Amino acid sequence: MFRILSSDDAVKLIRNGDCICVNSFVGIENPVELHEALYRRFHSFGEPNNLTLISSAGFGVWDENRNAEGYIREGAVKKLICGHFGAMLSTKKIVMEDRFEAYNLPLGCISHAIRAQAGGLPGALSKVGLDIFVDPRREGPGINRLSKDASLCKLVQVDGEEFLYYQLPPINVALIKGTAADRFGNVSFDDMYMSGDALSICQAAKANHGLVIVQVDRLVTTPSRPRNTIIPGCLVDVLVVTEPETRPVAFKALTGSFEIPYEEWKGWQEMIDELSQAKSKSNPAYNTIGRRAARELREDDIVNIGIGIPETVAKYARKNNLLDKITLTVESGGIGGFPASGTVFGAMIGAASVYDMANQFDLYDSGGLNICFMGAFEVDRFGNANSHRGPDAFSGIGGFANITANTPTVIFCLTFNTHGLLIERKKDEVTILQNGVIPKFVSNVRSVSFSADRAIKNGQRVLYVTERCVFELCPSGLCLKEVYPGVDMEKDVLSLLPFPVQLHPDLKRS
């Protein structure tokens, strides 16, 4: 039978050395009050300590002084395993300082490993991650010099085929945020943007004879409809009732609590972008990339569009009258709406369905997408892409590896160089006014997020769309496929590459 406790009393049940799994997605749906109660207890008493923290998509609220940032920074954590660190502003810096063990695994592989524990299995097999940084034959998942746990990702063979075996430490504490709990302890997520891994995390904690703590906005007397219950009361040990987070009215569009017709998506998107710091000034280079990349879309495509430059693809899909004829998806579980960005990345406007995150990655891992549009820090002569680790920054792989591993058509959207790039586009002609000082095309990427060799073996079609030209992945590496009108192929492309590039047999000007 569950108990109703204050957040401070609830975290007293967490012991030194516990392995805590948090349900959240980058910056949304974090159990903030539970994290801050943990910080208050650790700051005052030095415990719980020696903790292991796991989260598929990472946890943070884009504020280095809130949520888990304080107790991680002050030393409560010995090991951190996350798919993405983007919203963890303090943590993503100090993981590089060797203060504690820190590991980065593909988001979907963590989600599937949690689900495996929920079913009484020690781990999950996947082909996602082969030949990229997480593969133990390359770097492995450790981020810093302390991170040498070889059990998290192993290369194995089953029936003569190679797989990676992802195994997490046994989860014995679940920290979850839900909307409401009824008198039986059943938890619904009605006002939430997603449910993420919530059910699997709770089942995994109970499979390991552990503790489930759920933060909710309210208690209700009427039992939830069975299909609306995400976490059944029999799995809940503690409920913590907190004041609901104050959200702008526009954010209600992300809860799925009312229908949003396609014609209204754009208006809601603009309001949400303004509030979530996602609104950016029009950039001629980005727009040129988005316009060209959008030409690869086909009616009835199932699509994933990454954040950053790839988001311009949706703008041109709308202009091409295709946006309502394709199905957009987001890693957190949304299908059939329009992905939000900025601080609410992971939520969706007008979603047709929002299901558990592990199910979304079943779709991605099996090649269920038709096409995806991804960003990249850098691309090398072989066609490998690095999208998770910059020279002075570490964001993590997130869902990128799962999305790109088996999708038939992969489109990378990136500028040819950066930091100072200026272009002008008049009608269909592009003029390079000034090149950036940092090249994006390099002889060898710093770390491999996407393996060109494996993509060729898989028969995937891969394009690298820039503001001046398009490359295609060929068996020999990058091939120059298109040079835009107004661009001088020798001066603006070939002379700036640090390696020779093959000219595609069908080389043309767009």
Image: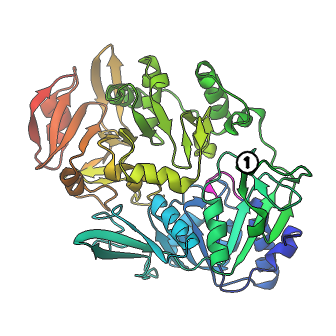
Q: Position of residue 159 (x, y in %)?
A: 25, 72
For this rendering, which residue is in front, 485 or 185?
Answer: 185
Q: Is residue 321 visible?
A: yes
Percent x, y for residue 168? 51, 75
Give the number of callouts: 1
Q: Residue at x 77, y 56 (%)?
A: 187
**Classed neighbour count for the residue bearing mark 1: other residues with Cα under 10 Å, few (<14), some (14–19), many (≥20):** few
Find residue 204 and report its horizontal and vertical position in percent. 61, 72
Judging depth in this view, the residue of 494 and 239 nearest the camera is 239
Q: Compared with residue 450, is residue 11 higher up or lower down, i.e. above or below?
A: below
Image side of residue 134 versus residue 473, left or right: right
Q: Is residue 453 above or below residue 334?
A: below
Eyeballing the image, is 485 above or below 22?
above
The amino acid beneath tag 1 is Asn
Task: Kindly report the secondary structure that dominates the magenta region of the rendered protein.
Answer: loop
The residue singled out by tag 1 in the image is 228
The residue closer to the viewer here, 484 or 176, is 176
The residue segment tinted magenta is 24-30
Instruction: State the image quarter where residue 365 is shown.
Output: bottom left
* Residue ranking furthest to the right: 221
Task: Give the quadrant of residue 410.
Answer: top left
Residue shown at 61% from the left, 42% from the top: 347
Q: Tell me the element at label 1.
A: helix
